[in-house]
Image (cartoon, helix red, strand yellow):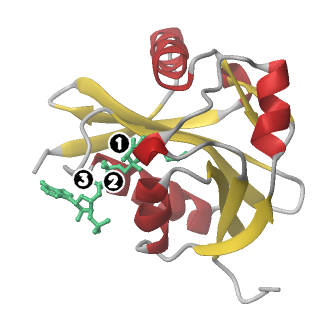
């Protein structure tokens, strides 16, 4: 088990590392999710460190209704607790800030993420059929075939309410 420490991304070096992470893992310095384009500099971020080395990151933003979207989550070494540590840090921060709802979008092929989030209390909340096909026309680097050999077409929204004001 890694000895993971989570910190805020704050320095220009942290954001440079995040930019590189997005380019390597998501194919670009910008992310398109639910038709919205995100630049890394617009987002808050937690970075996971293992013995001082960057080993993962979670980026997010908060809207005016105090709903908080995770735009990206990456563990550089999977299955050793990095993702869990980042989601815990995010949720702890959100509870302190009285955020009402955590949410995120993943793609239909990402069975690992669907399992990961559901085991951490997130529920499936919306399906957006075909929206990744539309995003691919703007950002051709989005692959056609994703994880497990599954064609990527759709976005799936997951959410976790932190207050009693659920739908
Ligand atoms: C989804 C993702 C973030 C999960 O991160 P992760 O670091 O692999 O997650 P964890 O290691 O914390 O947990 C994954 C599983 O490994 C298990 N695990 C944790 N430490 C472990 C260890 N030392 N040995 C074996 N298994 C371990 C956990 O128990 C967990 O199992 P569970 O889901 O059945 O509870 C990661 O797979 C990833 O980066 N995927 C690519 C990007 C992506 O899809 N992001 C999400 C969509 S935005």
Q: CA distance from mark 1 to mark 2?
A: 7 Å
- Is 59 displayed left or right of 54 in the figure? right
Task: Please say if the residues under marks 1 and 3 sit with CB atoms less than 8 Å apart.
Answer: no
Q: Secondary structure at mark 1?
A: strand
Q: Is mark 2 within 8 Å of ligand 1?
A: yes
Of badges 2 and 3, nearer the viewer stands 3
The numbered dot on residue 127 is none
The residue beneath circle 2 is 85
Which tag, 1 or 2, sits closer to the chain's start?
Answer: 1
Task: Please say if the residues under marks 1 and 2 sit with CB atoms less than 8 Å apart.
Answer: yes
Which tag, 1 or 3, sits closer to the chain's start?
Answer: 1
The front one of 70 and 112 is: 112
Q: Secondary structure at mark 2?
A: helix
The numbered dot on residue 81 is 3
Q: Is mark 3 within 8 Å of ligand 1?
A: yes
Q: Residues within 10 Å of mark 1 (few under 14, many from 20)?
A: many
Q: Position of residue 49 (x, y in %)?
A: 27, 33
Which residue does the image show at 43% across and 66% down from the upper left? 115
Of badges 1 and 3, nearer the viewer stands 3
- Is 76 displayed left or right of 38 in the figure? left
Can residue 51 be seen here? yes
Which residue does the image show at 69% across and 59% down from the upper left? 156
Q: Secondary structure at mark 3?
A: loop
Q: CA distance from mark 1 to mark 3?
A: 12 Å
The residue beneath circle 1 is 6
Q: Residues within 10 Å of mark 2 (few under 14, many from 20)?
A: many
Q: Is mark 1 within 8 Å of ligand 1?
A: no
Which residue does the image show at 63% across and 36% down from the upper left? 44
Task: Please say if the residues under marks 2 and 3 sit with CB atoms less than 8 Å apart.
Answer: yes
């Amino acid at each position: 088990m890694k000895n993971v420490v989570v910190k805020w991304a704050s320095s220009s070096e942290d954001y440079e590392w995040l930019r590189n992470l997005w380019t390597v893992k998501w194919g670009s310095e910008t992310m398109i999710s639910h038709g919205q384009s995100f630049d890394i500099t617009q987002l808050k971020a937690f970075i996971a460190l293992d013995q001082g080395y960057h080993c993962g990151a979670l980026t997010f933003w908060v809207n005016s209704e105090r709903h908080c979207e995770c735009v990206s989550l990456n563990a550089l070494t999977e299955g050793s607790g990095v993702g869990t540590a980042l989601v815990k840090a995010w949720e702890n921060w959100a509870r302190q800030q009285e955020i009402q709802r955590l949410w995120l979008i993943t793609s239909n092929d990402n069975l690992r993420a669907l399992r990961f989030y559901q085991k951490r209390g997130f529920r499936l909340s919306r399906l957006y059929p075909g929206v990744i096909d539309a995003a691919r026309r703007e950002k051709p680097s989005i692959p056609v075939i994703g994880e497990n050999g599954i064609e990527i077409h759709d976005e799936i929204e997951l959410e976790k309410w932190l207050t009693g004001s659920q739908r």
